[in-house]
Image: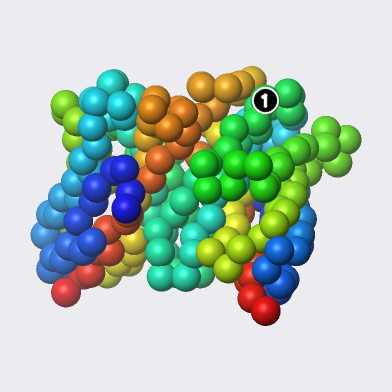
């Protein structure tokens, strides 16, 4: 069955960087677009970033544009989120999610539902 | 403030039917973009309940149903059970933001 496993979360000081990972198993990872979604303490779900099935296209929420970069490694079935210039309001649980649309890129990836999610990895930005 | 508006909370007794609404505008739901719904239990991964407005993934109970009309969408849960107590989120696409949007979430309490 489809499994997504996030890792790499932790405590980091404001202004520093952190990279979180998402490993996918149980499906053909390179056939599907992927997303990052976060949930700050006491808040709702917030979409963060998306990457097309082939890694050629990325989209970002305005709140992270210019600071976060999403990428994927086809050889290891892993997606990454490089987070730079971290701020306290980036504190959240970061979830990765799989689109339900094969070979999606750009807008179709952003319109599709997320049929599988990981358990999340916590990121705390604090001095 | 979320672009998609959901009531913060809803409640119902076991066996009853509740409806959770999700209101958008002409740049998202009103533009015809699909709405998806998720159930989120504390400490767990969110779970897809309804996709493309009114379709249930395999394995999701038929007690859950969805609809979309105009600039709004709704999730209905019939035959409420204690295990339905969770947070529920709607999701769509917004053309003015060029991105994915979620509702603020609705906490369902089973009395």
Decide if residue B92 is in sight here.
yes
* Circle 1 SS class: loop
Residue in view at x 72 percent, y 34 percent: A29
Scheme of image coloration? rainbow
Quadrant where the C terminus of chain A sits is: bottom right
Quarter of the image for the N terminus of chain A: give it: top right
Vertical arrangement, residue A37 with respect to residue A108, above or below: below
- Using residue B106 as the reference point, say whether residue A79 is left or right of it: right
User: Residue drawn 63% across and 71% down?
Assistant: A124
Q: Nearer the viewer, residue A17 or B50?
A: A17
**Where is residue A89 drawn, in percent x and y?**
53, 64
User: What residue sits 49% from the left and 60% below the top?
Assistant: A39
Q: Is residue B81 visible?
A: no
Residue that lies at the very extreme toward the bottom in this rendered image: A127
Q: Position of residue B70 (x, y in %)?
A: 16, 26
Residues A50 and B12: in front is: A50
Judge whether B66 appears above or below B12 on screen. above
Within 10 Å of disc 1 (Cα), the crowding (few <14, some 14-19, many 20+) is: some
**Front-lying residue, A29 or B3:** B3
- In this image, A90 relative to A30: left or right? left
Instruction: Identify the residue at horizontal 16%, vertical 28% (top origin).
Output: B69
| Chain where mark 1 sits | A
Question: Disc 1 marks which residue?
Answer: A57
């Amino acid at each position: 069955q489809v499994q997504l496993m996030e890792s790499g979360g932790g405590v980091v000081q404001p202004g520093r960087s952190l990279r979180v990972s998402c490993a996918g198993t149980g499906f053909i990872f390179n056939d599907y677009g992927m997303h990052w979604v976060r949930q700050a303490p006491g808040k709702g779900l917030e979409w963060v970033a998306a990457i097309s099935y082939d890694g050629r296209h990325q989209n970002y929420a305005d709140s992270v544009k210019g600071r976060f970069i999403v990428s994927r490694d086809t050889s290891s079935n892993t997606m990454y989120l490089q987070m730079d210039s971290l701020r306290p309001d980036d504190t959240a649980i970061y979830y990765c999610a799989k689109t339900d649309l094969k070979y999606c890129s750009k807008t179709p990836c952003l319109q599709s539902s997320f049929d599988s999610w990981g358990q999340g990895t916590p990121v705390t930005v604090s001095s | 403030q979320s672009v998609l508006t959901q009531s913060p909370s809803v409640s119902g007794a076991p066996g009853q039917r509740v409806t959770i609404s999700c209101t958008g505008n002409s740049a998202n739901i009103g533009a015809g973009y699909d709405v998806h719904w998720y159930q989120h239990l504390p400490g767990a991964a969110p779970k897809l309940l309804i996709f493309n407005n009114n379709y249930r993934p395999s394995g999701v109970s038929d007690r859950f149903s969805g609809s979309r009309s105009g600039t709004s969408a709704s999730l209905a849960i019939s035959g409420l059970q204690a295990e339905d107590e969770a947070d529920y989120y709607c999701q769509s696409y917004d053309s003015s933001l060029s991105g994915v949007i979620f509702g603020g979430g609705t906490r369902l309490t089973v009395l």
